[in-house]
Image: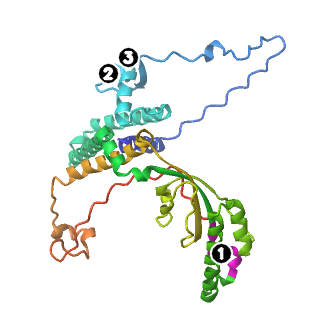
């Protein structure tokens, strides 16, 4: 339905660009400044002519198109089309529920242009031209498909409580949150300079780095201060850049790379091993840890399940038929070019991936520069 609304708005834009520009009205004459004898306005009080008009009722006209009518009128003055607020809101809500007011104004302009153009097309009998019915039929199928997708989306949002509980129980470890401190020792600091690509210098640097990481890790495990140890590591390695902050904050297991997610196995107060990554060595301290309750995780779970339910419904409808395309006419399908046939000797069927909860709102910790 959003696509239909976009088509309406684009049609309006194209029609407006095709219309000749209206002559500009001369600028209004400057109003004389108020003199001492003129009455001054009270601050905060609008003059009577600036008061906002009362909101129109359901049967009130919100769009009036003079000169447009389905049947010829007796006089040109009697030819007009009136659209009430109820009629317009029914259209707007069908295209996009809770449409913003600014969007409704755009829709109104687009709808008027479409009424004018479609009426002109009917007067010319264009709907009876060869090919017109096929175009109209195809447009109807597109509209019905969009309505179906929107309906499926609304149905997918109605996640049963039993499914929420089942998903929560099966992925409980994914909803763990931990407050972490972190020390980082980069493999390629700016001080490496031209020697960064030298294999011998690189091996020597990594050996020194690993020894330093183990030393800092032992000090951290002995209740060492992370801020001081982070600075000490940079000083020991001769790094002149500013050390990164050690407060990693509250994080989720899904926010960390796989090789670092094991820190969630720690107990509060424990320090991890020196974990190596392509960027360098990480040392974590788990300050505190908790697992979100089902009510706290419900929004996150619902988003995952809604997406799964929607995908299942669409796939169920799509797989209920089996189209066969003539290769003699269309040629081989692009996805099948160079692909071995299915069945014996062919590729195995693609396994469905297990559902995973959405990542935490917190961004993953970026390696310090």
**Residue 212 marker:** 1
Label 1 Cα crowd, 10 Å radius (few <14 / some 14-19 / many 20+): many
Task: Tell me where residue 83 appears, x and y as whole percent.
Answer: 37, 24
From this viewpoint, is residue 84 visible? no
Where disc 3 sits, the SS reads: loop
**Residue 51 marker:** none
Please state which of residues 318 and 202 is positioned toward the viewer in this rendering: 202
Q: Is residue 162 above or below residue 25?
A: below
Circle 2 residue: 73
Circles 1 and 3: CB atoms closer than 8 Å: no
Q: Split into 4 quadrants, where in the image is the C terminus?
A: bottom right
Which span is picked out in magenta? 184-193
Circle 3 residue: 59
In the image, taking residue 337 as reference, residue 235 lies left or right, namely right
Where disc 1 sits, the SS reads: helix
> Looking at the image, which residue is at 65% across and 80% down?
208
> Looking at the image, which residue is at 38% across and 17% down?
59
Mark 2 or mark 1, which is nearer to you? 1
Task: Tell me where residue 303 appears, x and y as whole percent.
Answer: 39, 45
């Amino acid at each position: 339905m959003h696509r239909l609304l976009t088509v309406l708005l684009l049609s309006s834009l194209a029609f407006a660009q095709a219309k000749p520009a209206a002559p500009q009205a001369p600028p209004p004459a400057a109003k004389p400044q108020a003199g001492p004898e003129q009455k001054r306005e009270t601050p905060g009080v609008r003059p009577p002519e600036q008061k906002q008009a009362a909101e129109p009722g359901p049967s009130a006209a919100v769009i009036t198109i003079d000169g447009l009518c389905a049947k010829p009128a007796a006089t040109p003055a009697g030819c007009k089309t009136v659209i009430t607020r109820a009629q317009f809101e029914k259209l707007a809500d069908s295209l996009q529920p809770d449409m913003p007011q600014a969007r409704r104004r755009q829709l109104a302009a687009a709808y008027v242009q479409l009424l004018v153009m479609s009426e002109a097309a009917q007067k010319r009998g264009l709907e009876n031209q060869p090919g017109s019915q096929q175009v109209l039929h195809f447009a109807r199928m597109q509209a019905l498909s969009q309505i179906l997708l929107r309906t499926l989306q609304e149905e997918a949002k109605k996640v049963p409580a039993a499914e929420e509980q089942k998903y929560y129980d099966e992925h409980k470890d994914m909803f763990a949150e931990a407050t972490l401190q972190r020390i980082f020792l980069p493999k390629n600091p700016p001080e490496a300079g031209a020697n960064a690509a030298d294999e011998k210098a690189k091996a020597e640097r990594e050996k020194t780095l690993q020894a330093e990481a183990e030393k800092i890790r032992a000090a951290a495990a002995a209740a060492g201060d992370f801020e001081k140890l982070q600075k000490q590591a940079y000083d020991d390695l001769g790094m002149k850049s500013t050390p990164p902050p050690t407060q990693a904050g509250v994080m989720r297991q899904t926010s960390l790379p796989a090789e670092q997610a094991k820190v969630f196995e720690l107990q509060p107060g424990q320090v991890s091993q020196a974990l190596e990554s392509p960027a360098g060595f990480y040392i974590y301290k788990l300050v505190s840890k908790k697992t979100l309750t089902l009510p706290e995780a419900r929004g996150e779970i619902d988003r995952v399940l809604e997406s799964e339910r929607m995908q299942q419904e669409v796939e169920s409808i799509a797989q209920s038929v089996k189209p066969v395309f003539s290769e003699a006419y269309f040629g081989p399908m692009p996805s099948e070019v160079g692909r071995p046939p299915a069945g014996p000797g062919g590729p195995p069927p693609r396994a469905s991936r297990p559902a995973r909860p959405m990542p935490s709102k917190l961004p993953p910790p970026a390696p310090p520069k």
